[in-house]
Amino acid sequence: MAKYRRKNYLVNKPLQLAFTGLAIWILLLGVMLAGTVTYFITINTIVDRMTAVDPKFGIAAYELVRQVNSVLGKRIIIMMASLVVLAGILEVLYMHRIAGPIYRIEKTLHLLSEGKPFQPIRLRNKDFFKGLAEAINNVMVYQQKKDEKVKELLQLASRYPELKDKSQELQQLLQ
């Protein structure tokens, strides 16, 4: 089997972008929720312990936390933006394994429905839906064999004058 190199990573933009967006939102929500909960539990525990030791330490701790939050907030925004970009790139690359086969299958089925010549569906090694592509290829081979048999029978039927008109109509349907 020949190796196929991808030329276009966005073959089905609505599908790929929808799944990429969904993956990024799930990733961001998980990271933000886990980070926020961990941060506030840790900071509150530290400040509470310092306040229990000496109330003056508690006031100083709250001021320190305010300053840390200011610096940390900027860094978190930069990290989240980097994470979104990286997740988006990785998701598009991964989704290509799904969108590419769907695109090829859809394209082949359109050609088949229009009666145009088509090639069997071939997918790359890491692509999804190989079983579906194989099943569609089997149906197409079966349909081609069936069409050839029907054409043979129509040619035989066209030899009889009473069936000639009907066989011509059927041949036009098969083309």
Image: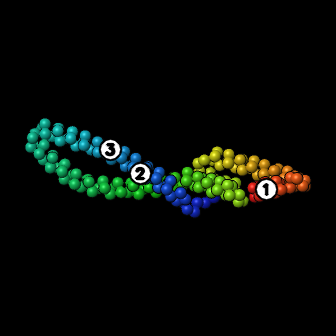
- From the image, state whether disc 3 or disc 1 is nearer to you: 1
Of residues 158 and 155, the one nearer the viewer is 158
Residue at the outermost bottom position? 7
**Label 2 or label 1, whichever comes before in sequence order:** 2
Please, what is the three-letter code of the amino acid marked with disc 1? Glu
Q: Position of residue 156 (x, y in %)?
A: 88, 52
Number of other residues with Cα within 10 Å of mark 3, as a class: few under 14, some 14 to 19, many 20 or more: few
The N terminus: image quadrant: bottom right
Q: Earlier in the sequence, mark 2 or mark 3?
A: 2
- Residue 121 placement, left or right of 20: right
Residue drawn at 33 percent across, 47 percent down: 32
Residue 30 is drawn in which quadrant?
top left
Q: Residue at x 75, y 55 (%)?
A: 173
Q: Earlier in the sequence, mark 3 or mark 1?
A: 3
Residue drawn where x is 21% and y is 39% of the image? 45
Q: How much space separates mark 3 and mark 1, taking CA atoms?
A: 67 Å
Of 35 and 54, nearer the camera is 35
Question: Is residue 124 visible to the viewer in this orientation of the structure?
Answer: no
Under circle 1, the secondary element is: helix
Residue 37 in view in this figure: yes
Q: Which mark is residue 24?
A: 2
Could you tell me how many numbered marks the image carries?
A: 3
Q: Amino acid at mark 2?
A: Ile
Between the residue at mark 2 and the residue at mark 1, the CA separation in whole angstroms equals 55 Å
Which residue appears at 9% of the width and 40% of the height?
Answer: 55
Q: Position of residue 113 (x, y in %)?
A: 67, 55
Instruction: Say which amino acid is labelled 3.
Output: Leu
**What numbered label is drawn on residue 33?**
3
- Label 1 belongs to which residue? 169
